Image (cartoon, rainbow, N blue to C red):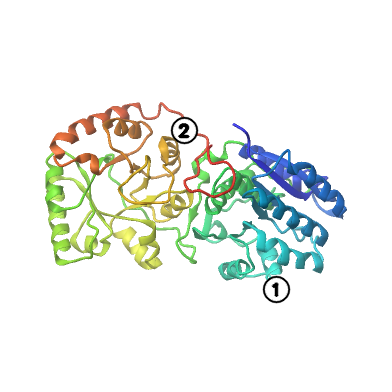
Amino acid sequence: MTRPVVWSVAGTDSGGGAGLAADQRTADAFGVHLCPVVAAVTAQHSREVTQVAPVPAELLDAQLAALADDLPPQAVKTGLLGSAEAVATVARWVDRLRERGPVALVVDPVLGATSGAAFADAATLAAYRELLLPRATVLTPNRHEAARLAGDDTLPAADALPELARALWRRGPAAVAITGGDSPAHAGLALDWIATEHACGWLALPRLDAAHHHGSGCTFATATAAALARGHVAADALVLAKMATTHAIRHGYAAGRGVGPVHAQPGFQSDASLLPRLSWGEAPRFHVSPRPRPARPLGLYALVDSAERVRRVLATGVRTLQLRIKTEATPAVRDAIRAAVADCRAAGAELFVNDHWALALELGADGVHLGQEDLLALDDERRERLAAGVALGISTHSLWELCRARSLAPRYVACGPVWPTLTKAMPWHPQGLDNLAWWVGMAGVPVVAIGGILSADRFHAAAAAGADGVCAVRVLGDDPAATVPALAAALDAGRAEAGRTARPAWPHPSLASGFGHTTP
C-alpha cells in the first residue's frame, strides 16, 4: 500500500532530540512518509538551546512548492516556525492544498523551549492566532502555550484546561488537545484534555517517572497528524497519539548529559497497556471498582423484545440475553422486565436490560446495556452508581468510545457493527473481523460482537476472532428452537479456533474523516 504522506514544517534540533528528528521517529512508528520541511534551524544540545534562526520565507515557500505536486500531503503538521512570515507562508500553502482536496492541519505551537528560550515574538504569536488557529484541524499546545495563545501568560491550573480549551476552540480550530505532561499528576495519572467534534474529556494513562522526555510534544503532534493521515477522525487520532507518546517516553534514552530524547517505535498500537481511558465529563474520574465477573463466556447472546420471547430463547439453552424494549417505562415494560428477571434467575441465565437502567436496578436484573449517548446523559454520580450496582454492557464503535467505556470497568463492551446492518441507521463503517480482533486484544474486558451477524458462518468467524459473546438478533427468526442449535455449534467451533489468527497491526477508521487513507 502507498504510505500516507505527512509534511512536517518544523525546526531542526542539532542534538537529535526534538523537532524534525522526533517527527521522523514518530512517522516511522506510524508507517507514514514524512516530508521534513525546515522552517527554522536551532543550535542546541541536551541541556540548552543556544541559537534559533528562522529560514527565509522564500526558502520555506520553495520547499513547499517543490513538494506540492509530487508528494501532496494528507496532513500537515507545524512545529517551530520561528517567524510571522513563516506562519503566513504555511497558511497560504494550506489554503492552496485544500483547493485540491481535504488536508488536515495539526498545529503544535512551539513558542518556547523548556530551558526558557523564546521562539515566538509578539508578531509571530499574533500570526498564529489570526492565520493558523482558524485553519487548524487539531491544535496541540501544552498548558503554557495554550495560555499564551488565549492571551494570558499565567500558567493555568490543570482543572482550568477544559475552559481554556473552549476559549481556544472559539478562535477557530476544529479540535483542541492541551497536553498535560507539564502538569502535576492526578492520582498517578498523566492527563490530556481533548475537545473534538465527537468527544471531550480527559485522556488518562499512568504517569511515567521518566528522566528522558525531550521531544514528547513534537511526538504527540506528529502522531496526531499521522493518525489523521491514516484516515482517523480527530478523537481517535488523539487516542493513538496518547498511546504513541507514552510508548515513546517509555523508550526514552540518554544522549548527552541532559534530558534525552523520547523514541517512538513501531508496534505501540498493539500494546494493550497503552490504551488510555477517557473521562465522561470534566471531572477526571476513572476508578470505578469492577464487580466480580463470572468465569463463563457470554457465548450466544440473544437480543429479544418481550418477556415471552425471553422464555422461548431460554428453552433453547441460551444463557445470555438482553431485553431490548424501545418504549417509555410504562407499567407493561415494568412487568416485562420483572418477568424476564424471574425467568432468567430460575434458568441460571444472565440478563441485561437495554436502556431502562433504573427499572433494572429496582427489579434486580443482572446487568444493563447502554449506548454511549445514554451514558453521557447521566451525571458522574449516577454513572458510577449504575456501574457499581449491576454488570454494565456498553456499546463501542470507535477508539474513543472504547477508551470512554473502559473508565466504567464494564462487564463487557460491544464492538460493532462487525458487518453492515439494517437493524438501525448509523454513521459507522463496519468494524470487520480485523477491528473485532483488535478490540479483543486491547479492551481488557470481554468483547461482544454485534451487527450484521446473520448466519452461522458469521458466528463462527466472530468467535474465531476472539469475541467472548456473539449477538443474535434477526438471525434468531420466528422459531429460536430451530435456529439456535446451528448457531451455537458454529460459535463453539469458532471458539476452538480463537487465537490462531494474528491480531491486525492497526485498527482501521470507523468513521469517515475526509482526510487521508481509510484502510490499514
In the rendered image, residue 503, in percent from the top left (x then y), is placed at 46, 33
Look at the numbered disc 2 and give the secondary structure of its residue: loop
In the rendered image, residue 270, in percent from the top left (x then y), is placed at 52, 38
Query: Could you say which is closer to the camera, residue 60 or residue 393?
Result: 60
Left/right of residue 282 with respect to residue 171 in the rendered view: left
Disc number for residue 503:
2
Residue lying at 67% horizontally and 70% vertically, measured from the top left:
150
Say if residue 192 shows up in the picture. yes
Disc number for residue 216:
none
* Residue 467, quarter of picture: top left
Tally the numbered discs. 2
Look at the numbered disc 1 and give the secondary structure of its residue: loop
Q: Amino acid at mark 2?
A: Arg
Depicted 245 relative to depicted 143: above or below: above
Query: Could you say which is closer to the camera, residue 70 or residue 387?
Result: 70
Left/right of residue 477 with respect to residue 374 in the rendered view: left
Q: Amino acid at mark 1?
A: Asp
In the rendered image, residue 284, in percent from the top left (x then y), is placed at 49, 63
Query: Could you say which is closer to the camera, residue 64 or residue 380?
Result: 64
Query: Could you say which is closer to the camera, residue 292 or residue 507?
Result: 507
Left/right of residue 415 with respect to residue 10 in the rendered view: left
Q: CA gap, disc 2 to disc 1?
A: 47 Å
Residue lying at 69% horizontally and 56% vertically, measured from the top left:
108
Residue that numbered label 1 is attached to: 152
Residue lying at 76% horizontally and 61% vertically, measured from the top left:
111
